[in-house]
Amino acid sequence: MTTAHETKEAREVSEGRVRLAVGAAGLGVFGYYTWDASTMPLGQMAMPGPGLFPLIVGVAGLISALIVILDAVPRLRQGSTLSVPGGRTARQVIGIMVLLTAYVLIIGSVGAYLASILFCTLSIKILSGHPWWRCAAYGTVMALICVFIFDSLLNVSLPHVDLW
């Protein structure tokens, strides 16, 4: 829920330009992702290799980014605008973006358990403002459930690091 104070801090930006920027960023990210996936073995139809699924995801991401860019062109002509939040809402969005980036960067070095606990705990703190002990308790439970689902139920191995 936005307050009157946060509404005053909102500003209008060109929707077409935002979509162009997001599409261009998507092309860059998914272009690199697709290139990196193409360096892994694809395998054969009977037994797909580790690069097949990432390659499919990368191509789908590239197509999505192109669609976003194509969708931006008529919006540029129309001059439509978006309201960008300010104040606490903007800080929360930026905080979660920073946490997601940090999560991706540290998961390989500290492992899925610790990275997920940190991500969940800090996300809850940023979004809720609850006391640290409560955020840590909720974050730990959430992270352990998510890692358990991936590791045990879905049989997807996540990065594991022995810290001790």
Image (cartoon, rainbow, N blue to C red):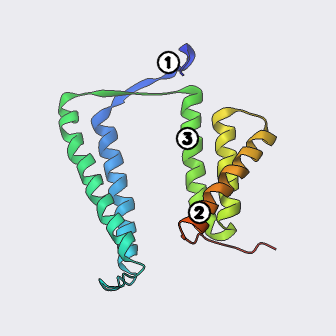
Q: Secondary structure at mark 2?
A: helix
| Residue at (35, 82) in percent of width and height | 42
Q: Percent from the top left, x then y, of residue 46?
A: 32, 85
Q: Secondary structure at mark 1?
A: helix
Q: Amino acid at mark 3?
A: Ile
Say whether residue 54 is left or right of residue 100: left
When the figure is inspected, residue 87 is found, relative to residue 27, above or below; the finding is above
Do the residues bearing badges 2 and 3 touch, measured as CB atoms within 8 Å?
A: no
Figure quadrant of the C terminus: bottom right
Which residue type does callout 2 highlight? Leu
Furthest toward the front, the residue is 153
Label 2 or label 1, whichever comes before in sequence order: 1
Quadrant where the N terminus sits is: top right
Amino acid beneath label 1: Thr
Q: Which numbered disc, 1 or 3, marks the residue that appears first in the sequence?
A: 1
Q: Is residue 62 above or below residue 155?
A: above
Instruction: State the separation of the CA atoms marked 2 and 3.
Output: 17 Å
Report the residue marked by disc 2: 105
- Label disc, if present, on residue 94 of the rendered structure: 3
In the rendered structure, find residue 7 and report the number of the disc placed on it: 1
